[in-house]
Image (cartoon, grey):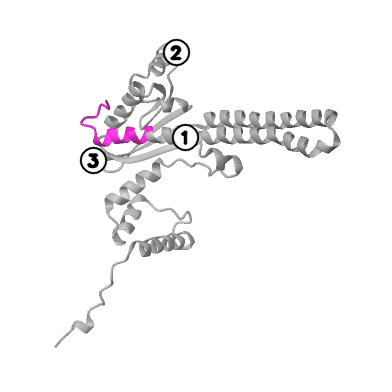
Amino acid sequence: MDDSSNLPAKKPPLDRAAIERVLARASELQATSASTDSSGLLTEAELMEIGKEAGISPNTLSQALAEERSRITVVEEQGFIASITGPAIATASRAIRGAPGDVLAAVDNHMQREESLRVQRRFPDRVTWEPRSGVFGQLQRGLNLSGRGYHLTRASQVAATIIPVDAERVLVRLDADLSHARGARIRVGSGALVAGILGSGVVALIGTLFAVPEASMIVGGAAAVPTLLGAAAGYQIGKGHRQLVMRAQLALEQTLDRLEFGSNRRIK
């Protein structure tokens, strides 16, 4: 006799979108359930178990947890000025094979030797650097024998955070704070706009005093020119910050490239 009709139906596997919906709904139920901890918090072990049931690789979950631990909350900037200048912080992260101490030491060595930075603060899992000052730092950047450009020296602070992922890998997160450089560009760009507006005022005043009535349209058009030129100059100055962020971003990514693909842990 065939007993297959009594067997439970085989459940089809879930795709990624379905897994995301299930986990999101489970989180909502966890937060509102009266039978669970009112905090609605999950331990890492519980999260790993949920991921296992959902068919997510433990290595993938471990890396996602490491990225969450290293995540820095940056307020999303909006408005006209932010749309021109772009972000104030460049950031890059990657999972790298190696022990936390060895990887952090390699990053520190690279930042000091190759990027003309010096240690600002040091913690067990994090190091921050600032631009090297003094004659040596200026000479190193001025000669630029390596051809690197030292784009990270435009940042007021560069930081590396190391979070273990598993027994063999760590997550390296690099951040470069370029808010001071962006602020300087905004001030210069605003100055160019103000100078243009003042120039327009001077042209309009001169035109009013000396021009004949029939030339009023010409005077009005001429008065608008300084303002337009000042606005265009201010826009280009502010927009130039995007290039600075891109160059700093590339420098961070290149550091991670050398960590990941270099022949040894001393980044040369």
Task: Residue under label 1, please give it.
Answer: 243
Residue 190 vs residue 265, the one in the foreground: 190
For the question of whether residue 161 can be seen, the reply is no
Range of residues picked out in magenta:
251-268
Mark closer to the chain start, 3 or 2: 2
Task: Residue under label 2, please give it.
Answer: 134
Residue 4 vs residue 82, the one in the foreground: 82
Task: Residue under label 3, please give it.
Answer: 168
Secondary structure beneath label 1 = helix
The residue that appears at 53% across and 44% down in the rendered structure is 76
How far apart marks 3 and 2 lie (CA) works out to 40 Å
Secondary structure beneath label 2 = helix
Q: Residues within 10 Å of mark 2 (few under 14, many from 20)?
A: few
6 inside magenta stretch: no
Which residue extends farthest bottom? 1
- Vertical position of residue 43 compared to residue 211: above or below: below
State the image coordinates of residue 253 (x, y, percent, origin top left): 35, 36
Q: Quadrant of the N terminus?
A: bottom left
